[in-house]
Image: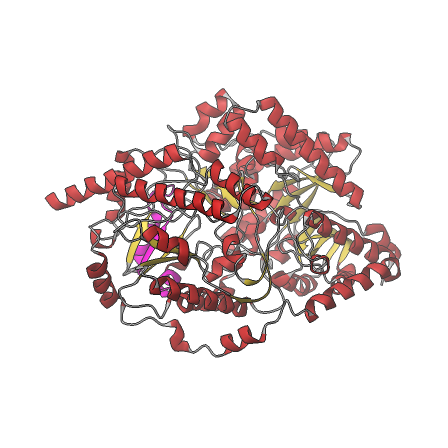
Amino acid sequence: MTTKSAAAAARATVYGYPRQGRNRELKKAVEGYWKGRVTAEALRATAAELRRTNWLQLADAGIDEVPTGDFSYYDHVLDTTVMVGAIPERHRAAVAGDALDGYFAMARGTQEVAPLEMTKWFDTNYHYLVPELGPDSAFTADSAKQVGELKEALALGLTARPVLVGPVTYLLLAKPAPGMPADFEPLTLLDRLLPVYAEVLADLRAAGAEWVQLDEPALVQDRTPAELNAAERAYRDLGGLADRPKLLVASYFDRLGEALPMLAKAPVDGLALDFTGAAAANLDALASAGGLPGKRLVAGVVNGRNVWVNDLAASLSTLGTLLGLADRVDVSASCSLLHVPLDTAAERDIEPQILRWLAFARQKSAEVVTLARGLARGTDAIAADLAANRADLASRADSPVTHDPAVRARASAVAETDGRRSPSYAERAAAQRAHLGLPLLPTTTIGSFPQTGDLRAARADLRAGRIDTADYEERIKAEIKEVISFQEKTGIDVLVHGEPERNDMVQYFAERLTGYLATQHGWVQSYGTRYVRPPILAGDISRPEPMTVRWTSYAQSLTEKPVKGMLTGPVTMLAWSFVRDDQPLADTAHQVALALRDEVHDLEAAGTSVIQVDEPALRETLPLRSADRAGYLDWATEAFRLTTSGVRPDTQIHTHMCYAEFGDIVQAIDDLDADVISLEAARSRMQVAHELAAHGYPREAGPGVWDIHSPRVPSTDEAAELLRTGLKAIPAERLWVNPDCGLKTRAWPETRASLEHLVTAARTIRDELSRS
């Protein structure tokens, strides 16, 4: 299946690599810098060593061309904002005073200045900092980071390719700056931005770059003719530059669709395309477009977003088909490996045979190298690899870990009525008001309270055997008592137990459900220095015993106020796990929903009157192409209703969502049929409240008034003003008062102050309403 030209062309590369280091050294260094324990010089030295380690690991594995520029202290879109000089006005003084401190001020805010808005990177659980632009925005080139990191890699004797967020995607991800007209379209600034990109490209060429990758994942979404024309113009102009490196335009996460023929004809030197999942349609589309004669194709045939081993034979078949469609075919993962953990070798608690089903970043890099070798030299050159791969795939398919007949029988027996609540919402709302007796503008929190060093130390002590279970549980009880006491003294109306026993909102439940695998070192960046360990959904799901009832009931025993039961919803359990790829997502979602349904019923039976089922990932998992969305939303909302239906009318069901664009799913939010929804809204100044109002959302809602991803403490006046804005969209009898999200990442001093201000603001607005 190989030819002389294939042998000359087939090389291995990747688009990006995990940033954190084997032991999350970057997280520790950045947080140490924020706390004043690590100097700027030490932070930069740690970052440089992590980059060096990553590049050398890739090169040692056989990667022919390493990426540069993908490393970030916080976020690569924020890095692009710095590269093009699009610093918001409110942050310019900080950036001018100290570039590093100003960078972190844009990411996290200060007590005086709000940060940039944060939202999800396409349909992943990675969060990026949203650029803020207006008609007067000016751009200036700052290529120091990109040039510096390229030079570091070249100094190691490596072939390196800088990776940049492309100009079209950058503008399509941006929002109008505060005070700008809401209908301002940042893409109108393209002609102003392109000369800055041209300058950066020239600087990279002068520094030794042969190729530069420009990532344009926004083009896999539905795009208007005007947006496609803008992209065509961008790459006509950049491709026509006299002083530039070779340009590789990359897309991933889905099929390019109508953008593919345009990019194929653009005067660029190569395309990098995803050929996994829904993006497999790129193969037929590329053939229909006439291929890429005279150009380079980087084929993403190893899934960069999931952790299952690649089907090497199937990928080789795809690569063989692609050989005739481009001048040169190289092999890569489908997207940056930022979205998977670093190395399976660190996992000691997963059974060795099951571990062979898994591939993290280092293993995926090895798969890319194997496929490039097979493409260049033929299957005989990788015969042993192919045989081992077939055995691993068969082992997984035949394993009892993956199939539970009882779970499948229960899922098959579900009737449509099992996913419908009765009576109507209006009747339920009346019953809940009578039962709960809450005031106007009731206050609550989202669920978690600060995870202190003492709590983390207690979990570590339990794992290490330094304390026994009884000692550990006494510490948990003490923390719950403190959380309940604080909330009562502060005057919060609906309390939470604070979740001190939970390590993560998905992992905690995954460890108590059959069918999941937990990792010890499978860290993945969610945002900034926030890393999570997504569990691995390997088999059919069931709940052996109650998971939350004990601690929720204990908290309720300490107060007369209602305490919310807190669960993570089925879609989020899938989205924030590495989900199985051997059955439809809808089937897996229904299995998880049935397990959670049992927990909801047990909480209600134990006396819990308010139960929150969080679905922050509902919007995140929305397919990037509108044609695929209706089917997804049908099964996703059905799974939520299956979880929450069957409770009494006076049991109030809450849900929560955060850090996403909600306008696209307002009807789906309605279809959940939850009684109350809490939503992130502080950074966007209550945008979601107006989106709910425009839809005619009939239920109760709590748009957040405290941005918990910033260390700043909102004043009472600030929270009250946000509530006044919210009241313009949501009637007072349906408006709740709460933070944007859980408080796990915050410290106790800012939590106390912020919640006291939040409660005072609610009382202030209640007084205003009573006088009006």
Whether residue 614 can be seen here? no
Q: Residue at x 27, y 70 (%)?
A: 424
Left or right: 271, with 140 as reference point: right
User: Which x, y percent locates residue 56?
Assistant: 76, 38
Q: How many marks?
A: 0
Whether residue 715 sits left or right of residue 628 in the image: it is: left
Residue sitting at 42 percent across and 63 percent down? 599
Left-right relation of 451 to 5: left
Q: Reply above or below: 270 against 311.
A: above
Quadrant where the N terminus is found in the figure: bottom right
Where residue 238 appears, as percent x and y from the top left, is: 63, 41
Q: Where's the C terminus, which quadrant?
A: top left
Q: Which residues are magenta?
A: 667-695
Residue 735: x, y in percent?
26, 51
Q: How is the image coloured?
A: secondary structure
The quarter of the displayed image where residue 161 is located: top right
452 and 758: which is toward the camera: 452
Q: Residue at x 72, y 34 (%)?
A: 52
- Above or below, 136 against 480 in this view is above
Residue 372 within the magenta-colored segment of the rendering: no
Q: Is residue 482 left or right of residue 763?
A: right
Q: Nearer the viewer, residue 217 or 22?
A: 22
**56 or 180, which is in the foreground?**
56
Q: Nearer the viewer, residue 40 or 550?
A: 550
The quadrant holding residue 420 is bottom left
Q: Residue lying farthest top?
A: 97
- Residue 65 placed where, x, y %? 76, 43
Q: Is residue 682 magenta?
A: yes
**Any part of residue 738 in sight:** yes
